[in-house]
Image (cartoon, rainbow, N blue to C red):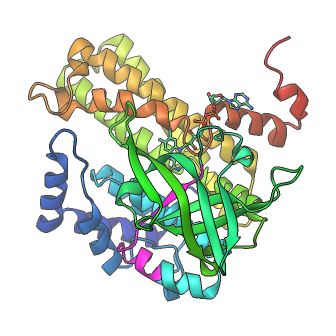
Amino acid sequence: VDFAPAPEQVELRRELRAFLVEPAVQEEIARMRECPRGTEPDPTAIYRRLGERRWFAVNWPEEYGGQGRSLYDAAVVSEELHWHDVPDTMHTVTADIVGLFLLLAADPDQKRRFLLPMARGELLVSVLYTEPEAGSDLSSLRTKAFRSGGGYLLYGTKVFSLRSHSSHYGLCAARTTEGPNPQHGITLFLVPLDAEGVTIRPLWSIADERFDEVVLDGVRVGEDAVVGPVDRGWQLMSGALQLERTGVEQSFKARRWLDLVIRRAQETGRLTDPTIGAAIAELDAEVEAGRILAWSVLSRITHNQLDAAAAAMSKWYSSELVRRIAALAVELDGVTAMLSRWDPDAPLHGFAESLYRDAPGMTISAGSSEVMLHIVASAGLGIPEEVTSRTSG
Ligand SMILES: Cc1cc2nc3c(=O)[nH]c(=O)nc-3n(C[C@H](O)[C@H](O)[C@H](O)COP(=O)(O)OP(=O)(O)OC[C@H]3O[C@@H](n4cnc5c(N)ncnc54)[C@H](O)[C@@H]3O)c2cc1C
């Protein structure tokens, strides 16, 4: 793998940076930074501007609103958004998770109807996979879809869905056929979130971002809401999840947050403190290692060499690293690190407090650390499942 950025990536980064410091964009970013406690920043105005320049989904084919560029270029866009404080959750979910899924599985009509407005940053789509009793083991999901009047009726409860309350559709996994093999009989649907029978309730977490519980009580969708083959959604979901677990997002967040720790250590004169300085130096090397792991996973995907173990390793490595960076951020300021961004005395707008609450979720979303280690053990090292699943003895 050649880790030096290609000239077109250097140019893309330069153009993005110029865009993100334009006064109108900076004004939007400042408005979001100052959003009152209990409210969420709304990045949709910036998303639409990105869409106008075909940057929102830069790696999608041109006919669907992208620029037909590489996954590396898409990673550059996400990095720059994060590094410039543009909330990127809905961008990641819509463009990198659902969009990628639709590119793989949707029919031409669905691609036209959904991908174009998504690439313009106008249509946001959330993910409705997890249920109260089905998370890591998603194949045990219980949401059901019954055939009815030329379409389907959906019943079930989804949890931990990010930003469903501000999305237009949800990509929902539901059971269409019961049988002895739980992985058979799952189908994917695009569900309009303003449809009759949909109830969205907040699920608060320790992090700033709100989750939703989405109850589907007899939600009617047409045949054209089905994405991919009926009953065979599991294979599609597993394939798409592997593409999601590159570790890229976790690695660029690790970079940004360690940079803030370094800035704070400089401000407080503690960079030369042997304990803090040594800890920072070690983490800095690990952040770079995480970046190399993540970009090498991207390189394999680009060359059609999907490697589940390498992707799981990368995701595990950088998400666990973020937790250690958060711990150091708190250690650096002691008790004042616990001041939130609404407190005028909070160091660097309360980044340590926010990071400390945000970090644990990164080791759970898109597959928990334990599950990542299972994949490394089984797919990477060939250790049989019955050994990796043993919890004692
Ligand atoms: C930040 C964030 C964003 C998310 N966004 C979405 C979203 O938009 N849409 C959506 O549908 N879901 C979303 N989720 C949910 C996420 O996919 C699930 O939380 C995750 O799959 C884990 O499922 P669970 O919470 O049910 O935990 P469980 O699967 O019940 O796991 C509980 C604990 O047991 C461990 N465990 C589970 N199985 C094993 C095993 N075989 N061996 C060893 N340990 C095991 C896990 O590691 C974990 O520590 C999000 C979660 C987070 C934290």
**261 above or below 336?**
below
Q: Quadrant of residue 359?
A: top left
Residue segment shown in magenta:
115-129
Q: Residue at x 25, y 20 (%)?
A: 338
Q: Position of residue 77 (x, y in %)?
A: 40, 63
**270 above or below 11?**
above
Most foreground residue, 165 or 305: 165
Most foreground residue, 364 or 225: 225
Check if residue 123 falls in the magenta segment. yes
Most foreground residue, 19 or 183: 183
Most foreground residue, 371 or 349: 371
> Which quadrant would the N terminus be assigned to in this image?
bottom right
> Which quadrant would the C terminus be assigned to in this image?
top right
Report whether 11 appears left or right of 364: left
User: How many numbered badges does the structure rendering display?
Assistant: 0
Q: Position of residue 86 (x, y in %)?
A: 29, 55
Q: Position of residue 109 (x, y in %)?
A: 58, 88
Residue lying farthest left?
A: 344
Report whether 161 appears left or right of 295: left
Report whether 123 appears left or right of 30: right
Q: Is residue 120 visible?
A: yes
Q: Quadrant of residue 374?
A: top right
